[in-house]
Every structure is written in C-alpha cells, then in structure tokens.
Image (spheres, rainbow, N blue to C red):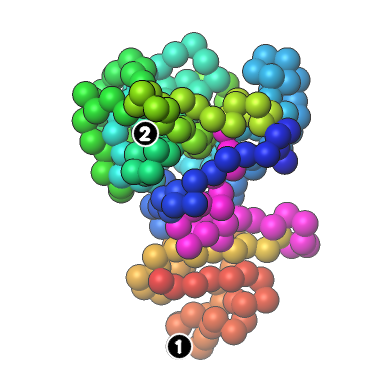
Amino acid sequence: MYKTPVEIPSNIETLINPLPSRYLKPDITQFFGENGLSIYRDVYGWLGHNGIDIFAPFGTICVSMADSYLIESISRNTGYGLRVSTFTDLGNNYGFTLTYGHFWYTYIGYRRWIEPGNKIYGRIKKGQKIGRVDSTGNSTGNHLHITLKVWKKNNVGDWNLINIKNGYNGAINPLPYLQDHTMAKLLVDKSTTPPTYHISFPIGSPDELKGLGRNTGLVIPEKADGTIDFEKLAPTGEVKPL
C-alpha cells in the first residue's frame, strides 16, 4: 500500500465514528489507496486516494473523531473544499492530524492554518459537532473525506510531519484506528450477489433498526408478531445492536 515503510506510534488514539447518525447508508465510497487516477498522480503526486470517503446525505452532522486542538477551519481552492483540521498530542513526542473535507458548514468558524502543537484556537472534544456534509471542492457527490497524518516532535519542540515519502505525502490509512472497527462494519461488500451489509450501529430499538433498513435498502425480516427475526437477517447481513 505504501511506497516506503511508515512509522506509526503504538499508542495512536482510537477514533470514533465521525457520522453518528443511525440512518446513514453504510457505504465507504472510496478506500485509502484506491484509484490511482491521474488527478492523484499528476496533480498531487500520490499513489492513490489519501484517505477514506464516507457517503452521507447533504447536511449530515460530522463530529470530531478524537480529543484534539483546532488548527484549521477554512475554505481553500483545493480538493477538500471547506475543511476542518485538528491535531492530537499523544504525549510521547508523537501526534496526529485529522482533516475532514467537503463540508457545507462548520460549527467552529473560520481559522487559517497554524502549526500543530499551537493551542490558540482552542480544544475540540471527541464527539463535538464540527461540520455538516456537502460536496464542496473536488467532489462528485455528498460525502465526508477523512485524512490522517502522523507528526513527531523534534529536540527543539517543533512538530514535523513524518512518512512524507510513503506515496501519500504522509497520509496513512485511518480505517484500522476506528474504534472497535465501527466503520469497518459500515461497509458494503459489493463482491457478493446481492451485496452483503456489515452494520454496527448503536441501535436502541426495533423501530430504529427498521428505519435503518428503509434508508439502506437492507431487508429487515420480521416475525409474525412484528419483532425482528435476527436468524433470517443473518444470511444477508451482520447487524449488531450495541
């Protein structure tokens, strides 16, 4: 996947689902490293996609995936469109940035880029609302783009981006660090016929699960008494009430 070996801290924080809505279609539309398109190679110099794209309807609320500090909230003439970037200090001379792209609106105003480690813009708590999904920038439809990069503090206290020769300008695949692999269970396995849904949501009631079915196209089988028949559901998908 990477052009060169990558350096990743052992204590990298697990990341929460940035789109906690229960009614999202569970579909990652583009994975890390996919699509070695000319725009990636010729314009950006990457081997492929430098993050993950998660489908979400227009206006869907996005929350911070980690406890962090804001380092950017701005609309630039770049592929990310209106974006938010945060930095998390892991406390062992390592840290990471998360960039959330293609927003319609941000809850935290507009801020120009500052160097990681600078806390002047204030803290962003895990789970805090940061923006709403759109298709701004280089995009063909509404979705959230996530880019994860690792930084390292040098002897004089400055933070430097590492892994910059890995083929993605330091970006690494965020999927393995998502809490309990939640987002991995938001995948649609399109290699099967019909596609297999792997869903893990904080489902609190049968009505919410039925609502999820209506919004994903997944058939939710019911028993005669109207309760969900999980045994019949199992062959077509994996639904785990949490």
Any part of residue 20 in sight = yes
Residue lying at 36% horizontally and 73% vertically, measured from the top left: 205
**Relative to 179, residue 31 above or below:** above
Q: Please name whichever residue, 116 or 234, is drawn nearer the observer in this view of the structure.
A: 116
Residues rendered magenta in the picture: 171-194
Answer whether residue 66 is magenta in the image.
no
Residue lying at 39% horizontally and 38% vertically, measured from the top left: 93
Name the mark nearer the viewer: 2 or 1.
2
Which disc number belongs to residue 225? 1
Residue for badge 2:
87
Label 1: how many Cα within 10 Å (few below 14, some 14–19, many 20+): few
- Give the percent coordinates (x, y) of residue 8: 54, 44
Residue lying at 34% horizontally and 26% vertically, measured from the top left: 157
Q: Please name whichever residue, 96 or 104, is drawn nearer the observer in this view of the structure.
A: 96
Q: Looking at the image, which residue sits at the far top? A: 77
Residue lying at 73% horizontally and 15% vertically, measured from the top left: 42
Q: Please name whichever residue, 168 or 156, is drawn nearer the observer in this view of the structure.
A: 156
